[in-house]
Every structure is written in structure tokens, then in C-alpha cells.
Amino acid sequence: MEKITQNQAPGMEGAMARWYARQRASAPQIAAVRRYAAQVTAGLPAGADVLEVAPGPGYLAVEMARLGCAVTALDLSRTFVEITADNARRAGVRVDVRHGDAADLPFPGGSFDLVVCQAAFKNFGRPVRALDEMHRVLRSGGTAVIHDMSREASRADIDEEVRGMGLTPLNSFMTKVPLLALRRRAYSRGLFARLAAESAFGTCEIRTEGISVEVRLTRPA
């Protein structure tokens, strides 16, 4: 049986966080974020309350705010909190950016219509607790969407992903190496199903494509 890792990954701060933010800002990646923002918020009412957990540099939070959502973003990295707030100001949109832990969300129950977590869930030290917190802050009928790297991604999948990022050869190499390492920390479909079963959600829907896995968890109406 596959093992569920419970160790907290080292947080990104300072120069490393700023380097990561620059690498994620290429035109192809921002275009992909814009498409994903439209996809993940499709069907929400105007002004829907959306929480992004661990937004990193905040590009997705900004794009969801551009679409008219009331976006809150929470990150454990103080550097990413600063970067997200700066990016929202430059974009001319409002994002309520908070510092905090995914396993202890500082919001009342039933606060959000949608919770999104992209490229970060594999780093959470208490994954079931994080899912329970997402369940708690969702309104009835609300959905949590986790989009992350899949443990089942092949090296060819990773090569293809990095080729599409529009990076320089050096930065492509510097991006590919950590992705290969992160794959060992990532979850497979089976592990995500186990986590969902252990959480307050109880069940989930899972889809994989390329290096990515998307998990949808709904709080029943």
C-alpha cells in the first residue's frame, strides 16, 4: 500500500520565493492560469466568495478576482503574502491576502463558495486536517478543488510540462530538477481517494492529465 507522507515541506521565503514567482510569470504560464481561473470558477454567481489556499505568487487569485469573484488568499510564506498583495495591487484588483496555515484556517465556518489549492497540497504536513478545514469553511453545496502534481507523472510528462513554460534553458533545467524531486512527495489517485475518505468530505472526484491531478470535493447541500 502506498504511504501518505505527513511531513511538512520547507516553506518558500525570501530569494527562493521571489525566484519561483519570476519563473511562474512567463506568458504561456500566465495564459494557462487565466484559462484555469475561468474553468475553476465557471458556474459561480457574480461576487462569489473564493478562498485560495497557498496561492504562492498569487497569479490565480488575481485572475479569479478579475472575473468578479471576492477572493481571499492565505499562505504560510510571508514572502508569498507580500508578493500576492503586490501583484493584486498592480493588477488593480482586490484580493484579501492573509498569513496563515492550511490546517488552521482563520475563517468562520461556511464562509466560502469555492476553495482552491493549486500546486501546494503535496507540501502540507497535515493533509487530512487541511481537507477538514476546507470542508468547514465551505458553504453547503460548495466545492474544494485541489490541482497538484501527480505521483504517477512520468519523466516524459515532466519534460513536456517544462517545455511549455516558455523558460530559458537554464531555468528549464532548474525547474525540472525540483519537479522530479517533488514527484516523490506528490499523491497518486489512490492516495487522494484515501485522504478524502478519512476527511469530512468522505469522497471525491479525481481527474489526471499530464503531470497534474485535479481533485474535487463537495460539501453536500
Image (cartoon, grey):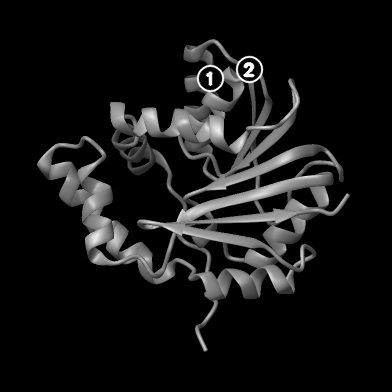
Give the structural element (helix, strand or loop) at label 2.
loop
The crowd level at tag 1 (other Cα within 10 Å; few <14, some 14-19, many 20+) is many
Q: Residue reaching furthest left?
A: 169
Q: Which residue is mark 2?
A: 94
The image shows residue 20, relative to residue 28, as above or below, that is below
Expressed as whole percent of the image width and height from the top left, the position of residue 76 reads 57, 46
Count the marks: how many? Answer: 2
- Residue located 58% across and 69% down the image: 192
Can I make out residue 6 in this image? no
Residue 193: x and y in percent read 62, 71
* Left or right, residue 125 beside residue 150: right
- Above or below, comparing residue 83 to residue 180 in the picture: above
> Could you tell whether 3 is left or right of 126 in the image?
left
The quadrant holding residue 217 is bottom right
Residue at left 46%, top 28%? Answer: 34
Residue at (63, 60) in percent of width and height: 205
Secondary structure beneath label 1: helix
- Find residue 88 and name its label: 1
The answer to whether residue 159 is visible is yes
User: Percent from the top left, x then y, of residue 54?
Assistant: 56, 44
Q: Give the spatial CA distance, label 1 vs label 2.
A: 6 Å
- Tag of residue 57: none
First of labels 1, 2 by sequence position: 1
Q: Amino acid at mark 1?
A: Ala
Residue 96 picture quarter: top right
Q: Residue at x 26, y 39 (%)?
A: 165
- Where is residue 109 drawn, in percent x and y? 87, 45
Label 2 sits on what residue type? Arg
